[in-house]
Image (cartoon, rainbow, N blue to C red):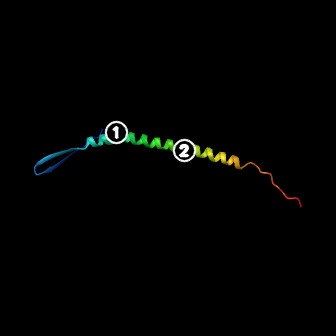
Amino acid sequence: MLSIVCTLTLSCQFIKILCSDAYKEFEKEIPEDLQEVDDRLEEEEVRLIYIVHYMLTVKKIYTYPLPILVPDC
């Protein structure tokens, strides 16, 4: 694991800023964010399946061959 320690000097005092805690928090958020994206993609896939099913049903209903009516001359 990557650990970063930064030191700053201000009026002869050393201040340590530990960036490793922020990095660990960032690492924890990555799987949560990926899971959220995966869930959204799955919901979108389900919606698209319903839309395709609906469109095929509509196409099936409206593509029956209709008899051609020709007037008697």
- Residue 25 sits in which quadrant? top left
Whole-percent x, y for residue 58 in the image: 66, 48
Q: Nearer the viewer, residue 66 or 2?
A: 66
Q: Which residue is mark 2?
A: 47
Q: Which residue is mark 1?
A: 28
Q: Nearer the viewer, residue 38 or 56?
A: 56
Looking at the image, the residue that sits furthest to the left is 12
Amino acid at pointer 2: Arg
- Residue 5 sits in which quadrant? top left
Q: Nearer the viewer, mark 2 or mark 1?
A: 2
- Tag 2 secondary structure: helix
Looking at the image, the residue that sits furthest to the front is 72
Residue at 10 percent of width and 51 percent of height: 11
Residue at 43 percent of width and 42 percent of height: 36
- Residue 28 sits in which quadrant? top left
Q: Nearer the viewer, residue 65 or 9?
A: 65
Whole-percent x, y for residue 52 in the image: 60, 46
Judged left or right of residue 22, residue 43 is right
Quarter of the figure that contains the N terminus: top left
Quarter of the figure that contains the C terminus: bottom right
Amino acid at pointer 1: Lys
Residue at 10 percent of width and 49 percent of height: 12
Spatial CA distance of label 2 from label 1 is: 30 Å
